[in-house]
Amino acid sequence: MASATTLRRSADRKVTNLPSPNGKTARIANSFGLPAGAAHSCPGATATCERVCYAGKLENLYKGLREVLVGNLEALTGLDRAGMAGLLSEMIDEFRVDCDGAERRGATVPRDFRIHWDGDFFSLAYAQAWADVVRAAPDIRFWVYTRSFNPERLDVLPVLKGLDNLTVYLSVDPDNLGAAKAARRRCPWVHWAYLAETFADGRADLADLPGKRYPCPENGRRIPLINEKGSACIRCGVCPSGRGDVVFSIAKR
């Protein structure tokens, strides 16, 4: 039985696992969001991300969206690990039902779910709750970007370790580059999502690091946000699969 309080998923066109037939909207909501910013769910927010946060800008543009995100945070606030895991698990069950229904109608539906298209891990107990949910849903592939990796503020990486169906990206920019390097030394299994002013700046900043890096093709305008073939993230597949590090450009060039 569902609880009286529920969490609401978001139908993010960039990440949806099933587009509409005309390729313009998301048929399945496969992402979850919280309100952005250090005052809300982002204890690791940097000056750069506060300046350019696209999700925060959408919150300011659309009052209804903001209400959904605030409602999600309010529903979780004050609960313990088990209580938060219960709400998150119910939400993932609803996502699974949507996927099952689409498949019965003949659609091909990858079971990919993005944690936090907006917002971040705001407490250790909340990260532990997500770990419990991911562990209990091996049929679903999750991915997440986080700035909560600084032990002086909040470091959720230890509780996310060892989950085969979760890919974790550190959200990195020049402001937290040192902390990210330290986090990767502690946790070499994580990936990076690096935000620079340009793709060239990103390549230069990361030149001394090992591994393969991919410029985000949607960010670089090489593939559309969504079309009848699918959403950008599912078509590209790098972030959901964790094939390597990703570079994003503020200037989109």
Image (spheres, rainbow, N blue to C red):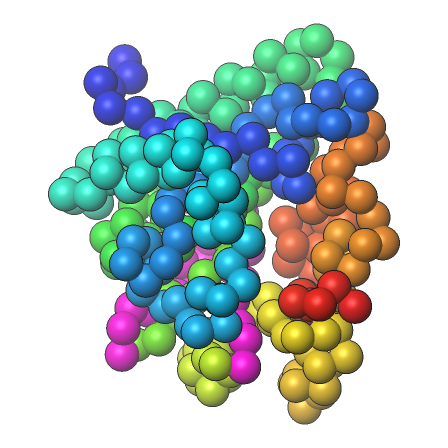
Query: Where is 82 relative to 145, above or below?
Result: above
Residue extending farthest top: 105
Query: Where does the image place residue 38, in percent across and percent down from the top left?
Result: 32, 62
Residue drawn where x is 14% and y is 43% of the image: 78
Where does the C terminus fall, quadrant-wise? bottom right
Q: Which residue is painted at 67% across and 10% down in the image?
A: 104
Q: Is residue 157 magenta?
A: yes
The residue drawn where x is 70% and y is 9% is 105
Residue 69: x, y in percent? 37, 38
Is any atom of residue 106 visible in this view? yes
Can I make out residue 116 in this image?
A: no
Quarter location, residue 70:
top left
Q: From which residue to which does the magenta span run?
A: 152-174
Q: Position of residue 71 (x, y in %)?
A: 30, 34
In the image, residue 104 above or below residue 190: above
Query: For this view, does 49 lie left or right of residue 2?
Result: right
**Left or right of 242, for residue 89:** left
Residue 199, relative to residue 163: is it above or below? below
Q: Quadrant of the N terminus?
A: top left
Image-quadrant location for residue 219? bottom right
